[in-house]
Amino acid sequence: MINRRSTLKSMVLGAVSALAMTAAGMPPAQAQNKELKIGFVGVTSGPAAAWGTSNVRSMQTRAAWINETGGVKIGDATYNVNIVTFDDQKDPKRAIAGMEKMAQEGIHYVVGPNVDDGAAAVRPVAEANGIIYFPYAFPKALYQKPASNAVLGMIANYQSGPAIYKYLKENKGVKTIAFVAANESDPLSQRDSGVEAAKALGLKIVAQNDTYQNDTRDFTPVLTPIVSLKPDLLVLSGVAPANAPLLIRAARELGFEGLISTETAQDAKVLEEGAGEYANGFISVGGASTPEIASDMMKEFVSRYTKMFGEYNDESNTKVYALEYILETLKANPAAINDVGEFKKTMDSFSAPNPYLKGDAKLSYVGTTSFGQKRQLAVPMVVNEYKDGAFHTLFVGTVD
Amino acid sequence: MEQVIANGFYLGAQYALIALGLTLIFALMNVLNFAHGQMYVLGGFISYTVYGQLGLPFVVALLASGVTLAVIGALMEKFLFRTVIKRSLREESTMLLAAATAFFFDAVILLIFGEKQRGVPKIVKGVFNEGGIIMPYDRMVVGVLALVFIAAFVLYMQYSRVGRAMRALAQDRVAAQLMGVQVDRYSMIGFAMGAMLAGIVGGLLVTITGVNSGIGGPISIKAFMMVMIGGAGVVGGAIAGGFILGMMESVGLTVLREYGDVTYLVIFAALMVFLSIRPNGLMGKPWG
C-alpha cells in the first residue's frame, strides 16, 4: 500500500540515487577538488553595465573552462574556481558593501570595481581584510605607496593617450585636438590627463571644456560647436561603449572629417550597429583578440565565451587577464592563497607565459614608471582601428 | 545659430512624444508611471529585434512595439494598478508599485536583451545641408513622424468617443462615473495608450539613438521634467514642456559650453525657480 511515508522514502531514495549517479559520472579529480573563490565587485546593471558584465563573463567563461578540464593545481591541491559576484550598480556605497561581502566569504582576490569612485571607496575595506583587488579605474593614488592592495587591471589612459597622440601626430599629421567627456569623475580625469599629454606633445588644443551627461541620447547639440572648430583629432575621453557610436555618428553627420579616438576599450559589434560606416577609422585601445596577435588559446576563449553567453564582447580582450594573473601568481607561490602578503612579494619577480598572445609574450606585473611600484597587470596595449565591423591592430605598445 | 534652433526643434519633437504617454497616465489615474522610461526601452528593443535582427520592414517593427506595449500597459493596469488603487487608501502605494515595475522591467530587459548598446540600420540615408543647417534626413523623418503622432493623439483625444471619455475621467473621475463612463474600461485603455506611446517613441528613436538596457531611468526623469514644466496631466503642457526642454538643452550646450557641463545645472535651477512661482506648471490643472 502506498502511503505518505513510503512516498517520501521513495523520493529521498530517488534523490540520493540521482546524486550518487551524478557524482559517479564526474571525473575523479573534479570530485575531490577544493574550492577557490575569486570575487567580482563591479557594475553589471544600468547604463555602464557593459563594463562589469564583460569582466564577469570573462571570469565565468575562464572558470568554467578550468573546471571542465579538471581544475587548477596550486601547490599540492587542485581547485575548482568559483566566481562570486556582486553588482555595485556603479554606486560607491554598494561597492563597499560588495567588498565587505567578499571579506565575509573569506575571499582574498577580487576583480573590480570598474570606476574611480568605487575603486577608491573599497580601499579601506580591502586593506583591513587582506584583499588584493584589481580595479579598472585610473586614480594613481590607488596604486602608489602607501597603497599596496590595488592592482590596475588595464592600461591607463595616461599611458595609452600619449602613445596614440604621438602616433597620430607623426603618422597622420594631427596638429589640432579637441576633447569631449561625460560629466563624471572617470571621463573628466581621463580628459585632464589627455589634455596634459597633448600639451606635452605640442598639439594645439581647440576644445577641452565640452562635456555631456552620461545618459545623453542625442549628441548633435553637444558636438555642433566642437565640429565647427574643425580639429584634426576629436578625443572621446573615457567614453562608455554605449555612447561611442552615438558620438561618432553625430560628429560625422555634422560633417566632421578629422580623426576620432578614445583610450577606452570598445566593442566592434556595438560600433557597427550604432554608427555603421561612420565608425570606420575610429581608434581605440583593445586587448588581444585581433587576428594579427591572438593565440589559439585566445581564439578558444572567444569561442567558449560566445557559446556560453551568445555573443562575444571585445572589451573582454583586456578583461580576460585578471583571473589568469591571479591564478598564475598563486601557482607561482601557493602560500599566497590565504596570505596576500605572499602575493605581494611574488608580484615583484613574477613572470609566466602569456597564453593569449602569439609568440613569447610574458605575463608580469608592471607600473614602476607610473606608480613607483609594480601594481599593474602587463596587458598588451593594442591600439586598434575599426573598419567594416572589425578591429585591426594599428600598433602594439608596452607599459613598464 | 540656425543649427542650434534646428537641433532644439528636433529634440523638442522627440521629447514631447516621450512625455505624452506619461502625462496621459497621470491625468487618468493620478499615477506617476516610473516605468515609462523602461517601456520606452522595451519598445526600442522590440523594434531592434523586428527591424534590425529579423529584417522586417520598419513599419512592422513600429507596430510591434506599439501593440506589445499597449498589451503590457493594459495588463499592468488591470492586474496591478487597478487592484492597488482599489485596495490602498494611500496614493503613495501606486508610486511604489510603479517604481517596482520599473526595477522589474530593468532586470527583465537586461536579462533578455543583454548589456550592450544596440542600433539598427538608418531608415533614410543622407544629410540635408543648406542655409547653415545640417540635419540628417532620418532625423527629419523621425521629427515629422513625431509631430504626426502628436497631432493624431491630440485629435483622437479631442474628437473620438474614447478620447472624450478619457478627458471626462481626467476632469472628474466620480462625475464621469455618474454620467455612465466605464471607469475601469477607459482607465485600462488610457494606460494602454500611454504605454503604447512609450513603445512607439522607443521604436522610432532606436533608428537615431539606438537603445540599451540602462537608459530607462534617465528617460523617465527627463519625461517627468517635461511634464512638470508643462503641467502634470495636461497634454498641451507635455508638448510645450518637451519643446522648451529641447530648446533649453540645445541653446545651453552651445552658449554655456565654455563653462563645462552647467547646462543641466542651469535647467534644474530654472525649473526650481519656475515651480516655486508656478507649482502647477505652465498649463495648470488637468484638461477637460
Image (tube, rainbow, N blue to C red):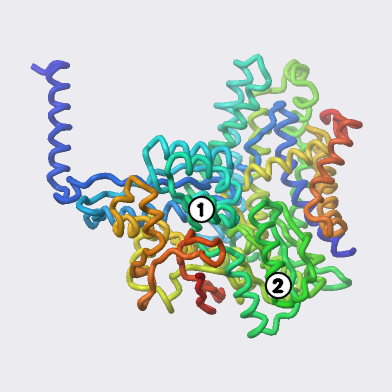
Task: Identify the image quadrant of the N terminus of chain B.
Answer: bottom right
Which residue is at the front of the view, A371 or B108? Answer: A371
Which residue is at the front of the view, B113 or A396? Answer: A396
Residue drawn at (64%, 80%), measured in percent from left and top?
A168
Q: Residue B116 appears at what percent x and percent y? A: 53, 56
Q: Earlier in the sequence, mark 1 or mark 2?
A: 1
Q: Residue A201 appears at what percent x and percent y? A: 70, 77
Task: Identify the image quadrant of the C terminus of chain B.
Answer: top right
Which residue is at the front of the view, A138 or B156? Answer: A138
Can you tell which mark lies on residue B61? Answer: none
**Residue B8 located left or right of residue B120:** right
Considering only vertical position in the picture, is A159 above or below A104? below
Q: Residue A85 appears at what percent x and percent y? A: 43, 44
Residue type for callout 1: Pro
Q: Which residue is mark 2?
A: A198
Residue drawn at (80%, 38%), measured in percent from left and top?
B235
Residue A17 quadrant: top left
Q: Residue A104 appears at what percent x and percent y? A: 40, 35
Q: Which residue is mark 1?
A: A135
**Residue B262 located left or right of residue A262:** right
Considering only vertical position in the picture, is A253 above or below A374? below
